Structure formats: structure tokens, C-alpha cells
Image (cartoon, helix red, strand yellow):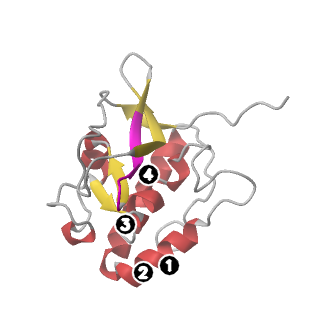
Amino acid sequence: MTNPTPAINVPGTFRLITLDTSRSPWGRIQESDILAWGSALDGSRVPLLWQVHTAGHGGTRVHPELAARYFRALPKDCHAYGGSRLWFEEDCESTVPLFVFYNALDPACWLVRGDTPFPRAKLLESMAFYLAHTVPAVTAIARTVDVDLARAGVALRSPLEPAGA
């Protein structure tokens, strides 16, 4: 029997919040998957990033403390829901948190699971096509997240080149 891939936690501490399944920008949440984790003050695991599905649509939900920490420099028009930086629509906008937190995604996440994870570069290509004006800010945020993860001892599955390289 092989050991499972160790859990990845975003550095820092976060308060536990419960995903309200009665509502999202697309309606009632029928199903959700946790994509990334952090730690609470007591050391317990806290969900930080969710993929949500509704009857007709869905997207990615970001923990408010994670958004406050990393998304302050994010252009407001790269996501649709009132500038909250919490909800990212699945067709285009979800590339933003998936790209930014790529190295923090739980090993069981559909995007990085198995021997052939979806390439981070493909997320960047999609973002460049649909949200081109956001790429510099999003890439800078992703570098910051990668640095924070590396300082915490997380092996990066797809590190970005340093700025100016």
C-alpha cells in the first residue's frame, strides 16, 4: 500500500466558515468539492476554495480571508459578482483562483489529480484569451502565493518563473 500524497495547507490561519448551500450567484448549490485547505488556530483543517455546482451553472468560491490576503490587487472586472472577489464563474473567471492557487490545490482535486494534471500554463492561456487585461496582476498574485507556499515547505508542482526572468 502506498502512502497518500500529503495534504497541502495554505500558510497562515483562517477561521472556519460554512459554505451556505442555499445560495450562490447561480442559485442553490447542489454539490460542492473542496479544492484547497488551510489551518485554523487550533490546527484543524479549514476549507479555503470550493468548486460549486447548481442546477444550471457554477463556479469557484474563495474563503473571504484568503481573498482579503491575496486578491486586493485583482482587477474588479475579472469577476462578476459585485467586486466581492469571492465568487468566480466557471466558464472563464474560475481560471483566476485555479491559476493563483494551483500549487495549493488538494492532491485529490480534479485539476491536479493523477499522473497527468491539467497544465497551469493552459489556465494562463485561457485567462489571456478571456481576461487579458488581468494577466499581469493575476500572475503577480500567483507568484506571491507560490513564494508563501515554498517558504512553508510546500513542494511546488508548477512554479512560475521569477518576475523579469
Q: Which mark is residue 128?
A: 2
Secondary structure under badge 1?
A: helix
Which numbered disc, 4 or 2, marks the residue closer to the eye? 2
Residue 11 position in % (x across, y down): 44, 36
Q: Which residues are magenta?
A: 47-56
Secondary structure under badge 3?
A: helix
Q: CA distance from mark 4 to mark 1?
A: 19 Å
Residue wearing tag 1? 125
Q: Residues within 10 Å of mark 3 (few under 14, many from 20)?
A: many
Residue 50 position in % (x across, y down): 40, 46
* Residue type for callout 3: Val
Q: CA distance from mark 1 to mark 2?
A: 5 Å
Which residue does the image show at 34% across and 78% down from the upper left?
A: 131
Which numbered disc, 4 or 1, marks the residue closer to the eye? 1
Q: CA distance from mark 3 to mark 2?
A: 10 Å
* Residue type for callout 1: Glu
Left or right: where 116 falls relative to 20: right
Q: CA distance from mark 3 to mark 4?
A: 11 Å
Q: Is residue 107 above or below residue 40?
A: below
Residue wearing tag 3? 138
Q: Earlier in the sequence, mark 4 or mark 2?
A: 2
Left or right: where 154 falls relative to 87: right
Which numbered disc, 3 or 1, marks the residue closer to the eye? 1
> Which residue is the extreme one toward the front?
55
